[in-house]
Image: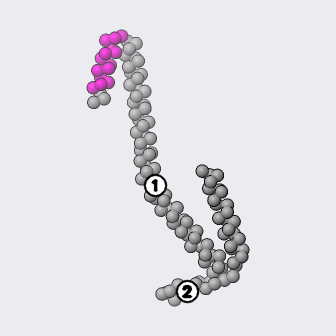
Amino acid sequence: MRFLFWIIALPVLAFAGAFAAANPGPITLKLWPFPLEIALPVYAAVLGPFFAGFLLAAIWFWLKSLPGRLARRRLARHEQQLEEETRRLKDELAAAERRGPEASDEARRRMIANAD
């Protein structure tokens, strides 16, 4: 995945650099309806909104994926708790089987009662 990122990112960055080198001249942006004028190089006026949009989209998708990431984290914690409980119950069963068949049957009954 990282390789794919660099395959796409390097040409985009090279294009942005070439565009910036070829268009250093200033332009004046008038921000209607406000009485503001901003003098910027052409490349800043073109590439600035592009990178701002990229940043906003990245933040948007990060926020949209947040519930899924939190759910996965919660499920991983739950899975770990269940694995620990399974390990504990297996240890109890093995200890009960070492004590004898009567203790083993009693341990099974307790585990079944605790599972419900």
Q: Locate residue 78: give its quadrant.
A: top left
Q: Is residue 109 above or below residue 61?
A: above
Coordinates of residue 10 in the picture (x, y in percent):
67, 61
Q: Helix, strand or loop at disc 1?
A: helix
Residue under the image location 44 percent in, 36 percent down:
80
Q: Residue beneath label 1, please?
A: 65
Q: Is residue 77 above or below residue 63?
A: above
Relative to 41, residue 3 above or below = above
Kindly report the distance in space between the C-alpha atoms of the residues bearing marks 2 and 1.
37 Å
Measured from the top left, where is residue 87 in percent x and y? 43, 27
| Residue under the image location 51 percent in, 66 percent down | 56
In the image, 22 versus 99, the foreground residue is 22
**Residue contact between numbered discs 2 and 1, judged by CB atoms under 8 Å:** no
Locate residue 107: give its quadrant: top left
In magenta stretch: residue 109? yes
Query: Which disc, if any, is residue 15?
Result: none
- For the record, the magenta segment spans 100-113
Is 20 on the left or on the right of 88, as rendered?
Answer: right
Query: Which residue is disc 2 drawn over?
Result: 30
Q: Secondary structure at mark 2?
A: strand
Amino acid of disc 2: Lys
